């Protein structure tokens, strides 16, 4: 038989579960924000590496051009 006491206990259990899920959502949102920041930083790092690659390629072209002209 279901008693009022048991129903109230179940209600408290459900309320506690709601609190846990809300906390988990807050943590997930914080993690998402951090992951987005990490992603932006990594994309910026790729852009910087691409810049360095381009500079190295240009320097190599200039060095090769100077070497060819000296011969």
Image: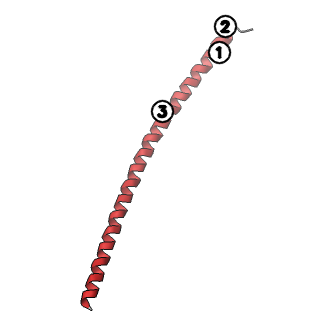
Answer few, some or many: residues within 10 Å of disc 1's Cα (few below 14, many 20 plus, some between 14 and 19): few
Can you tell which of label 1 and label 3 is closer to the viewer? 3
Write the residue at 35% across / 63% down. 50
Residue at the spot x=54%, y=25% of the render?
19
Q: Are marks 3 and 2 in contact (CB under 8 Å)?
A: no
Asked if residue 50 lies left or right of residue 35, the reply is left
Q: Residue at x 46, y 40 (%)?
A: 32
Residue 4, label in figure: 2
Q: Is residue 7 above or below residue 50?
A: above
Name which of mark 1 and mark 3 comes first in the sequence.
1
* Mark 1 lies on residue: 9
Q: Position of residue 10 (x, y in %)?
A: 64, 16
Q: Within the image, what quadrant is residue 55 found in?
A: bottom left
Q: CA distance from mark 3 to mark 2?
A: 33 Å
> What is the secondary structure assignment of the residue under circle 3?
helix
Asked whether, in this view, residue 27 is left or right of residue 46, the answer is right
Q: Earlier in the sequence, mark 3 or mark 2?
A: 2
Residue topped by disc 3: 26
Q: Number of numbered discs present?
A: 3
**For the point 43% across and 43% down, which residue is it?**
34
Q: Is residue 47 above or below residue 18?
A: below
């Amino acid at each position: 038989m279901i008693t009022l006491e048991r129903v109230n206990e179940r209600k408290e259990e459900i309320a506690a579960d709601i609190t846990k899920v809300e906390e988990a959502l807050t943590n997930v949102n914080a993690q998402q924000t951090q992951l987005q920041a990490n992603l932006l930083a990594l994309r910026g790092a790729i852009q910087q590496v691409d810049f360095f690659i381009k500079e190295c390629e240009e320097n190599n072209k200039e060095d090769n051009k100077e070497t060819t002209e000296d011969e």
